[in-house]
């Protein structure tokens, strides 16, 4: 292993709080002996697309509470109670595998929760910061709780511009491809308006910036780790937006998306803050992914991003056990 050996027994269960949100489907409250309040939030799981919670849809009861807003509220509730109930809190890690990975990537891209610590990056706050001459980021973050997102074996990603990897080249698709699959860059696969699912959370998030690029810049600065199973290389088929524009397998799609991030950041003269780790010998299995040395390091490790590279003197994009 290129990372220090880690095992679950090294972590004191009394120092870890695990919360597992259940985004209810309408049938979940009927096909069970569990009891739910009549106004329990639920998200459609069959239309207009499957499992709409993954993409930030509003609930089906009130039709105004996005699944992403529900996640915002979870982390914000923890932070509101930090001093009284969690005074030793150091880090909040939001982890998702497969469909959960799709949820986490898109939420990390679009969330404007102040728990991320980058709320100054919206254009109104950025202008105010510049006017006031505030340059206190280092002190502001010194005692802050770090929010980290881990995207594991996601089937698809929300891309940041209209280019895709086709035949090994990051490019705009040919017109005939775009005509045959016109929604390839619409939400859930990109940031263009449209797509099968109207999501007010996304449009509201985008409208808080002068330009889409500001949201992209914010995402690039966030603590995001992509975990990929080296054996999660089976061909997956779902839709033209996934299959024709993002890659053959989950492993390939993860590699393509991460390479796209590096190209986008390089074009702006910056380095991407995100990390991609490949877990050797593991396929589409959440247990093996998260119990691996790299999975545990991603969740619990104190090192992050450039610090990992500096410490281990390796290219974290190509880490393999």
Image (cartoon, rainbow, N blue to C red):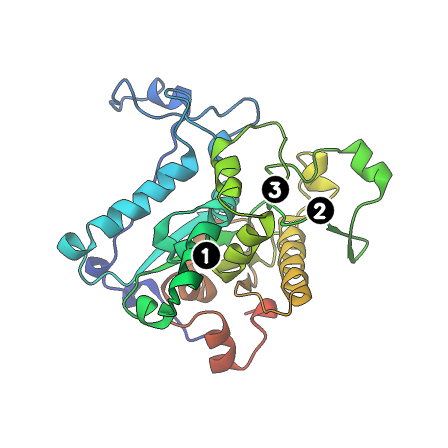
Whether residue 89 is situated above or below residue 311 in the rendered picture: above
Q: Nearer the viewer, mark 3 or mark 1?
A: 1
Q: Earlier in the sequence, mark 1 or mark 2?
A: 1
Task: Pinpoint residue 111: horizontal percent, then vertical percent.
Answer: 44, 46
Residue closest to the eye, 278 or 260 = 260
Crowdedness near tag 2: few (<14), some (14–19) or many (≥20) residues, C-alpha within 10 Å: some
| Residue 195 horizontal/vertical position (percent) | 63, 30
**Residue 78: x percent and y percent?**
25, 49
Crowd tier of the residue under label 1, counting other residues whose Cα lies within 10 Å: few below 14, some 14–19, many 20 or above: few
Reading the image, the residue beneath label 3 is 191
Residue sitting nearer the eye, 165 or 162: 162
Viewer can see residue 19: no
- Along the polypeptide, which appears first: circle 3 or circle 1? 1
Q: Quadrant of the C terminus?
A: bottom right
Give residue 320's quadrant in the image. Answer: bottom right
Residue on which disc 1 sits: 127
Residue 162: mark: 2
| Sequence-wise first label, 2 or 3 | 2
Cα distance in 3D space between marks 2 and 3: 9 Å
Rendered view: 171 above or below 55: below
Marks 1/2: CA–CA distance = 28 Å
> Residue 309 location, x and y as percent?
52, 77
Nearest to the observer: residue 107 or residue 52: 107
């Amino acid at each position: 292993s290129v990372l220090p050996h880690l095992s679950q027994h090294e972590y004191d269960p009394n120092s870890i709080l695990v919360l597992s949100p259940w985004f209810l489907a309408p049938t979940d409250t009927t096909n069970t002996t569990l009891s739910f309040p009549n106004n329990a939030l639920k998200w459609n799981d069959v239309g207009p697309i499957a499992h709409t919670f993954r993409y930030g849809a509003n609930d089906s009861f009130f039709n105004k509470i996005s699944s992403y807003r529900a996640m915002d509220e979870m982390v914000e509730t923890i932070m509101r109670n930090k001093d009284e109930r969690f005074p030793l809190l150091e880090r909040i890690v939001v982890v998702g595998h497969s469909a959960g990975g799709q949820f986490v990537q898109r939420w990390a891209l679009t969330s404007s929760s102040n728990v991320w610590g980058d709320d100054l990056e919206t254009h109104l706050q950025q202008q105010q910061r510049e006017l006031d001459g505030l340059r206190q980021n280092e002190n502001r973050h010194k005692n802050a709780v770090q929010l980290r997102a881990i995207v594991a074996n996601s089937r698809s990603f929300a891309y940041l511009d209209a280019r895709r990897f086709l035949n090994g080249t990051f490019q705009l698709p040919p017109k005939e491809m775009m005509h045959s699959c016109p929604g390839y860059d619409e939400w859930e696969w990109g940031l263009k308006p449209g797509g099968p699912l109207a999501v007010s959370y996304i449009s509201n998030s985008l409208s808080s910036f002068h330009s889409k690029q500001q949201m992209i810049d914010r995402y690039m600065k966030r603590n995001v780790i992509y975990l990929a199973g080296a054996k999660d290389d089976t061909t997956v088929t779902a839709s033209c937006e996934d299959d024709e524009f993002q890659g053959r397998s989950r492993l390939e799609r993860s590699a393509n998306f991460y390479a796209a991030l590096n190209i986008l950041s390089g074009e702006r003269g910056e380095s991407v803050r995100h990390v991609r780790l490949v877990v050797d010998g593991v396929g589409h299995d959440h247990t093996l992914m998260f119990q691996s040395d790299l999975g545990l390091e991603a969740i619990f490790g104190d090192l992050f991003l450039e610090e990992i590279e500096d410490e281990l003197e390796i290219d974290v994009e190509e880490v393999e056990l």
